[in-house]
Image (cartoon, grey):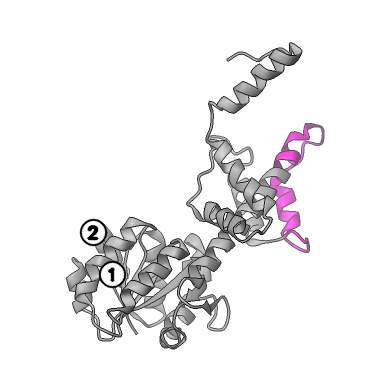
Amino acid sequence: MDLGMIGLGRMGGNMAQRLVRGGHRVVGFARNPATRKQMEEKGIASAASLEALVNELKQPRVIWIMVPAGAAVDETITALMPLLAPDDVIIEGGNSNYKDTQRRAQMLETSMIHYVDTGTSGGVWGLQNGYSIMVGGDEKVVARLRPIFETLAPAPDKGWGRVGPSGAGHFTKMIHNGIEYGMMQAYGEGFAILHRKKEFNLDLHQIAEIWRDGSVVQSWLLDLTAAALAENPGLEGIAPYVSDSGEGRWTVAEAIDLDVAAPVITLALLQRLQSRDSESFSNKLLSALRNQFGGHEMKKE
């Protein structure tokens, strides 16, 4: 199957490589000529413009967008629309807000262009292990795209599926990432407690390796924890600063809208926000208040 790929960053490039290995013809577009050259060296045809990309594909065309969520997606769709024809398909594989996905699908429907959202998990390991793909969109259109998803998934019958109409794929991936926040936070806190218990001189990498087999807490995240601790047992040189890409915030907002209690995911998000505040005004005020009402000593900077 012919496929155009817009956004040949690390994940997009890896996905393109997996598709080529699976027998698909992939034409990639990236603004940076050096990126296009790298992809060509890996057997991926490249186009120097969106017009050239579209012209390289057979109708009905399939174009997979892997660009940052938000304005970049809208700008790419706006640029593509005059170049596409009815029955062409745009697949959006980024971490977009599902409400934006629903809006875009409705807009493209007037031009009879299909919009499929694919929440995609697997990170840099997807090239080797395959990707988990949560698909939203018209059932018949998704069926047409089945060979693509079967190639990208860990196995043709595992790790992917159509979960519902437009927006459902990105919604499911949003909740997936919210769960991920909670799991990562639990691992982080547990290993922090182990690390603080100095009297036992615990080997955290050894413990992670023990838990990887037979334990109820075994998971791929634990595998990655073990790998990180093998590389850097004391985590030297790493700042205690944790970013977020938005999905956790959206998950918490959705939980509030739906009256669903989600304390673990919410607190995991708040912990990430707190990690970025090296000059916490609220903590300074707490210290000042303890001094005001109880005369407790304040630690000075």
Q: Is residue 51 above or below residue 146?
A: above
Residue 31 - label: 2
Identify the residue at horizontal 59%, vertical 27% (top origin): 282
Q: Position of residue 13 (x, y in %)?
A: 37, 65
Q: Is residue 194 above or below residue 70?
A: above
* Disc 2 + disc 1, Cβ < 8 Å: no
Residue at numbered disc 1: 28
Amino acid of disc 2: Arg
Label 2 to label 1: alpha-carbon separation: 10 Å
Residue 105 part of the magenta-drawn span: no
Q: Position of residue 109 (x, y in %)?
A: 33, 78
Amino acid of disc 1: Gly
Residue 203 part of the magenta-drawn span: yes
Identify the residue at horizontal 71%, vertical 18% (top origin): 290
Overall secondary structure of the magenta section: helix
Q: Can the viewer see residue 52 in this picture?
A: yes
Q: Position of residue 274 (x, y in %)?
A: 58, 37
